[in-house]
Image: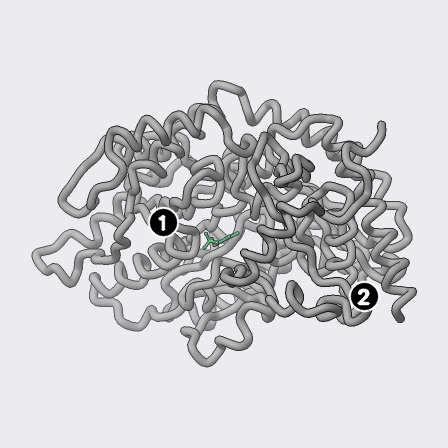
Amino acid sequence: MQPLNPPMIANAGSDADAWRARDLAVLWHPCTQMREHVDHGAALGSGDDTLPLLAVARGEGAWLVGHDGRRTLDAISSWWTNLFGHAEPRIADAIARQARTLEHVILAGVSHVPAVELAEKLLAIAPRQAGREPLAKVFYADNGSAGVEVALKMTFHWFRNRGVEGRTKFIALDNGYHGETLGALAVGDIPLYRRVYAPLLAQALFAPSPDAYLCEPGESPADRARRAADGLRDLLERHGGEVCALILEPRVQCAGGMRMHDPLYLKLARELCDAHGVFLIADEIAVGFGRTGTLFASEQSGVQPDLLCLSKGLTGGALPLAAVLATQSIYDGFLDDSREKAFLHSHSYTGNPLACAAALASLDIIERDDVIARNRATSARMTGLAAPFADHPHVADVRQAGMIVAFELTRGGDRRTPFDPALRIGLRAYRAALQRGVLLRPLGDVLYWMPPYCVDDDALQLLARTTREAIDHAIDEAAACA
Ligand SMILES: *Cc1c(COP(=O)(O)O)cnc(C)c1O
């Protein structure tokens, strides 16, 4: 098959150029060294290129369409938010209907239909574990980081309300990520995002990551999970009485480089939390809603957390919304005569009706279109297309969890010899893929596929071909510059 787009600079053309200029005159983009967009040579240290800025006019399924009509495959589901493709008509209709009915209303002292229906629905589909009290209450926030803040504050406050003052810390995992606000950043362990703000951050304790990429020779992912759980046990034995909660990303540490671990770990972590009276917060903001093959990743471990954080795919990728699901016991711990014992946390847009309506439409699509079963077939095709990469001389690991496939690029394919970060292999691959009509946004030198669930076979083949070309191009280009 021919590439759908001829190799060329991402949506070149006068309209796109005009939009880029207007953009750079006024916008400050997230997670971006802006100098790389405006200063020639700043991104790659040589040549006169700037980092490309993809100007998008509209979205259509798995594709982003430029002002000149040129299509770019959104291979990362727009930061892992999109489930069924862009401008999904059923979600768009639900939002439009809701906008004409009730666009927003204060949620303190007020009830509205989408907030109630969505809470009922989320509680009905949430992970369950025999013998454990189910998740019973939903607290809304308006983005993932805010949802994480809610969960952290709830566990701390719950202990306070019982007169326990010594539990002031959280345990998080090495290489974990929970968002960018100061509370969420405090339980994150990605130096690039965290280091500069370290003086502002609350103290957290970090337990070893069960990351299967870090297996010793001969060690299985399950062995690695057991070894990481031993580390968690040590930490809890020393500090258990000071800890409110363990927060972790089940199955895949996404921002940490799509590092995956054996589901056994969550089961062991659940047992350890129970033994030490510590709450378990599952951050399924990135992995929820079918991304890893089951509706929620925790299901693969047969585990129910005490608090479940959801966002990103919650609305199918259409609007910002977060939901924190909690047990009845946690909720009951705030019932009191005192207002200070109440959970007074709030956001102006808590439980926004438009976002709740989008989420209800999204959950309806998951059911009606049998999305989990269809994803199983799509992820099997992704497995087949990813397999040949294992033989690539600079690919150290190909790993997959459902609709996520990741490629770890290293020098000579050896896990102990990462590329010099200054070579910016990932960034070079990003640029090369964009020129070929595919939006990848590597995490360092980890390239990954995390496409919308509606991605078809032609698009997956373009993705596989382009990924290989982009890797080869990046390595050749870096070698030529060195
Ligand atoms: C993206 C992400 C967050 C933060 O969500 P935002 O909406 O970007 O604030 C938190 N946890 C995980 C696991 C995430 O992937």
Check disc 1 and report its element: helix, strand or loop: loop
* Residue nearest the viewer, comparing 91 with 208: 91
Within 10 Å of the Cα at label 2, are there few (<14), some (14-19), or many (20+) other Cα atoms? many
Q: CA distance from mark 2 to mark 1?
A: 38 Å
Please state the total of marks drawn on the protein image. 2
Check disc 2 and report its element: helix, strand or loop: loop
Residue that badge 2 annotates: 419
The colouring scheme, among rainbow, by chain, secondary structure or one colour, is one colour
Query: In the rendered image, which quarter contains the C terminus?
Result: bottom right
Residue that badge 1 annotates: 142
Q: Position of residue 421 (x, y in %)?
A: 75, 69
Side of 244 where 449 appears, left or right: right
Side of 371 where 139 appears, left or right: left
Q: Position of residue 80 (x, y in %)?
A: 56, 44
Residue at x-position 30% and y-position 42%: 352
Q: Position of residue 474 (x, y in %)?
A: 83, 56
Tell me the kind of residue under disc 1: Asp
Q: Is residue 373 above or below residue 245?
A: above
Residue at disc 1, CB closer than 8 Å to ligand 1: no
Q: Is residue 96 above or below residue 109?
A: above
Tell me the kind of residue under disc 2: Phe
The answer to whether residue 224 is seen in the rendering is no
Side of 446 where 115 appears, left or right: left
